[in-house]
Amino acid sequence: MDFANQIILVSAGLITFSIFAGVLSSRIGAPLLLVFLAFGMLAGEDGPGGIIFDDFAVAYLVGSFALALILFDGGLRTHREALNRAFGPSLALATIGVVLTAGLTGVAAKFIFDLGWIEAFLLGAIVGSTDAAAVFFLLHLRGLRLKTRVAATLEVESGINDPMAIFLTLGLVGFAAGAHSVANTSDAIGFLLDFLWQMAGGGLFGAAGGALVLRAVNRLQLSSGLYPILTGALALLVFALAQAAGASGFLAIFLVGFTIGNNQHRATSEIARFSDGVAWLAQIVMFLMMGLLVTPSALVPIFLPALAVALVLILVARPIAVWACLVPFSFTPKETAFVSWVGLRGAVPIFLGTIPVLSGVEGAEVLFSIAYVIVLVSLILQGWTVPLAARLADVELPPRPMPDRRVELDLPAGKGKSVVAYTVDPMSLLARRGVNRLPLPMGTTVISVMRDGVVRTEGLDQGVQPGDVVMILTTADMIPTLDRLFGARRARTRTKDTGTVDFVLEGTASAALVADLYGLAFEAEERELTLEQFMRSRLGKDIKEGDRTRVGGVALTALQVRDGAVHQVGLDLDPPQEESLLKKVRMRWREALKSLRDLFIADDPRGPF
């Protein structure tokens, strides 16, 4: 009993102190996941905590469970539009990119550590994939916003490249442990067939499982608090079944999350909030446990050569692999460099490093220690500099305004409909415009405005005051757009010679999608165009930076024009009101009358005769 209580005390204490340490470290920009990892090391046998933990089997079990939950949450937050936009480059990076990175890193490890070829490539496979937890967290650190295709490519790649790294690791472990022979043709063919089944089977289990989980959520009548638990349990069931069938359960659970996140269902906000909390807990536990597992004193003898391998991975292997994969997709050199730099390694390589140890591969503990050093270097060198790299690569977008307070209430009967209550910020767009003048997204309706406890549903065009609560009926996918409209606009983007804009959009964006998001009154034929085509249709072929056109009460500005093509369009939701022709005539008439009055009626400056 006392031992059980001690376990609970230590676990709760580690998690609590890790969170507090993370809050403090965020003020100096330290990657939070690095803090969790370092805190686990300090709590271990070589640190002040003195906790001895060397059970690789438990680490593998907990790591599998945590990684599955993290990937489910990643799939839940990956939008279909992002996947469509980045599917080609992400798939290339998640397959060919992982193989190239593993191969080049393995060659470096072969000569730096004098390993056998199988062991060297095994190390390359262990550290070959980017970490979903690290990428998802750092790309959203402090509201960091990136160009849509760049962000989508990095997020989707990190979500789907783990199966390839796991497959390579398991296959090479079989060769290193002597279960397979490189010279045996049947083993090589079996290796290839196993890869095909891992990918295809994971996709089948994920697609079928996602559809079944979605149907269960929509058909069963449960208490709202049970829907997230049901969804998580069924997703883990799909993961376990896929793994038992020899397919990739990690790919399957990512696809289950993707299916749930991109379809209307009950308890949207409950599932999203629950999954976010569980994913955070999984990340904390995973990084703490991996920190406990390593013995820092064992890292000292191999630190410098491991650092050399890490630098080869970051500065040579990853850039070459990224360049080779992204060449067909017309990424700019700066975008390619940024994607290369955000090849973050996290808990996944440490988790994969436990597999050779459990399989009895000779020298596996050394491979584990090398992988650990590589992760530390990646989190320190790359994780600490992601915002700076985004600015240098010119892929950072202005931060979106976020509301201070937002309350969501799902409507079970509406399947995806939510009632959202926003408290009006003094610096929001809403505080300066009437509710009926807001460019609200399609399918969004203002229900009421509450002020001092009194609800009113009429006269909404008269405007609101800071502190008022606006209740809106909308769909879950429109909430991010409403967040931008109701958030504090403390830093509008000032552009050269074009004034200020609220949002910067890519010229390749669909005019129909932008119209639906911001309530723009495009003509039917204009909705079929991209924003670049729309600007050219309105302004002609000779567009210059700063040229503007209006759509209702919203202005669109050509921000970046290269070779006659509009690459970026600024959206100004509150442009200066243009005067009508009648108003201009009246003003000119008043000015003329005033001039006549001054001429004939005003006192003579020379005084009376």
Image: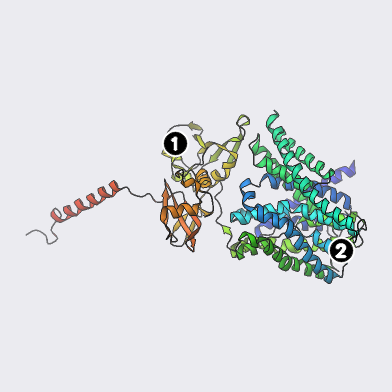
Secondary structure under tag 2 reads helix
The percent position of residue 168, horizontal first and vertical second, equals 81, 56
Which of marks 2 and 1 precedes in the sequence? 2
Residue 109 shown left or right of residue 88 in the figure: right
The percent position of residue 170, horizontal first and vertical second, equals 85, 54
The percent position of residue 521, horizontal first and vertical second, equals 45, 43
Residue 471 shown left or right of residue 162 in the figure: left
Q: Marks 1 and 2, how far apart in space?
A: 69 Å
Q: Name the residue: 67% across, 37% down.
A: 270
Q: Amino acid at mark 1?
A: Leu
Q: Name the residue: 59% across, 54% down.
A: 148
Q: Name the residue: 41% across, 50% down.
A: 550
Circle 2 is placed at which residue position? 119
Instruction: Work out whether residue 62 can be spotted.
Output: yes
> What is the crowding at mark 2: few (fewer than 14 residues within 10 Å), some, or many (at least 20)?
many
> What is the crowding at mark 1: few (fewer than 14 residues within 10 Å), some, or many (at least 20)?
some
The percent position of residue 547, horizontal first and vertical second, equals 42, 58
Camera-nearest residue between 72 and 405: 72
Residue 78 shown left or right of residue 288 in the figure: left
Q: Quadrant of residue 305?
A: bottom right
Q: Quadrant of residue 26?
A: bottom right
Q: Quadrant of the N terminus?
A: top right
Secondary structure under tag 1 reads helix
Q: Amino acid at mark 2?
A: Glu
Circle 1 is placed at which residue position? 460
Instruction: Work out whether residue 225 can be spotted.
Output: no
Q: Quadrant of residue 208?
A: top right
